[in-house]
Image (cartoon, rainbow, N blue to C red):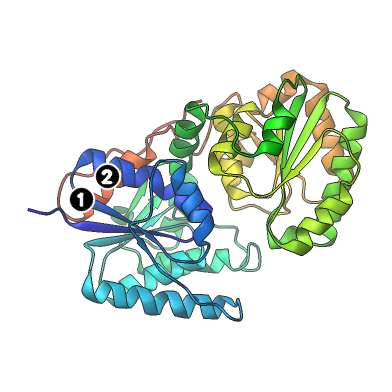
Amino acid sequence: MSLPEVHLIGGTRPEAVKLAPVAIAMREQGLVEPVLLASGQHPAMVTQALAAFDLTADVTLTIERSTGSQAELMTEMVRQLDALWDVRPPAAVIVQGDTTTSLAGALAAFWRRIPVVHLEAGLRSGDLDSPFPEEANRKLVAQVASLHLAPTPLAAMNLLDENVPATDVMVTGNTVVDATLAVAGRKLPFSDPKIAAARQGSKNRLVLVTAHRRESWGHPLDRILAAVRTLVAKYPDIDVILPSHPNPAVRAQVEAGLAGLERVTVTDPVPYADLSRLLSEAYLVLTDSGGIQEEAPSFGVPALVLRDVTERVESIDAGCAKLVGSDTQLIVDEASALLDDPARRDAMTVNGNPYGDGRAAHRTAQATAALLGLTTSPEAMVGVSR
């Protein structure tokens, strides 16, 4: 007798990274058949991310885009998902986070009366404009989800405050912790030759910089790059690696802002295995990425967050991250304080990772099977670990 299918839908690299451990855990538990479904939003990056776990998508949608608008992407994904689930209806659908793919998957499943499991539920910035459109997406998904898997107690409390029934909410931890620990633990060689060359034989402290969000483009990015220039000039014992956004205008801005600097390596977006290894070797991270805010504490690496607000306030409350926005002097001052004082730097992450203990994927797999009446619910996450 075949197992009931659960479709795990992702369209971006972070989604693929966070869904991959769940698919692996489901196969290990043997209660449901996981089907990895690539939505077509960023197909190449999804393929690359899944490859880090020796996985491939079971189903890939081909999305034709002419305008590049969110409305076009949303419409086409919903249409194709509805057609797929008309002939191959799953027992449940798992969507992750707050992308257009997440919203499209949730709505298409809800309209077909397929239970929706929302992985990484309950994140809130309290501002519909920041991040845009993610804040609205995750709130909309919450309206149709049957099971809300919150990464932290604070995320769960956000859902309860919105009158989501407590019986439908579980704290699982964030599966990105499972993912990054597993991939970094394999200690794979760097696949990006520029990174391999920069790290080979270097005794310098590594500062990893990422500034990918649209809010960072333009003048904010100029200020961030100015801070990088100042730090490189001030500290001859640091190396900077900056994976750039693939947008040609953003890449040109980064190249121009860091032209001629030694000990600075600008790369294309890096494979997930490379990113996990970089995080495991970093002394400090400057980032506007939500995922990196969640991953860095597992390696004892503090993060200076290049945003004015963050929905991942747990890292701020735990002390392992600090908001600095794009103010050049503030970035330089806060980074200098950590570069000058290793004890201060280590103190930021002494309490471990507030986002998980490496068991989130197993809880997610069991909770999904429990939703389908196939097993009992798992115990919620308690505490954190390094």
Asked whether 295 or 84 is in front, the reply is 84
Q: Earlier in the sequence, mark 1 or mark 2?
A: 2
Query: Dot 2: within a 10 Å radius of its alpha carbon, few (fewer than 14), some, or many (20 or more) residues?
Result: many
Which residue matches tag 2?
Answer: 26
**x and y percentages locating residue 297 in the rendered image:** 58, 32
Residue at the spot 59% in from the left edge and 53% down from the top edge: 311
Residue at the spot 73% in from the left edge and 18% down from the top edge: 343
Badge 2 amino acid:
Met
Relative to 64, 369 lies left or right: left
Residue at the spot 26% in from the left edge and 57% down from the top edge: 6
Compared with 74, 177 (above or below) is above
**x and y percentages locating residue 295 in the rendered image:** 56, 38
Q: Does any portion of residue 18 appear in the rendered image?
A: yes
Which residue matches tag 1?
Answer: 32
Q: CA distance from mark 1 to mark 2?
A: 6 Å
Secondary structure of the residue carrying tag 2 is helix
Asked whether 326 or 381 is in front, the reply is 326
Secondary structure of the residue carrying tag 1 is loop
Q: Does any portion of residue 327 appear in the rendered image?
A: no
Badge 1 amino acid:
Val
Residue at the spot 39% in from the left edge and 68% down from the top edge: 105
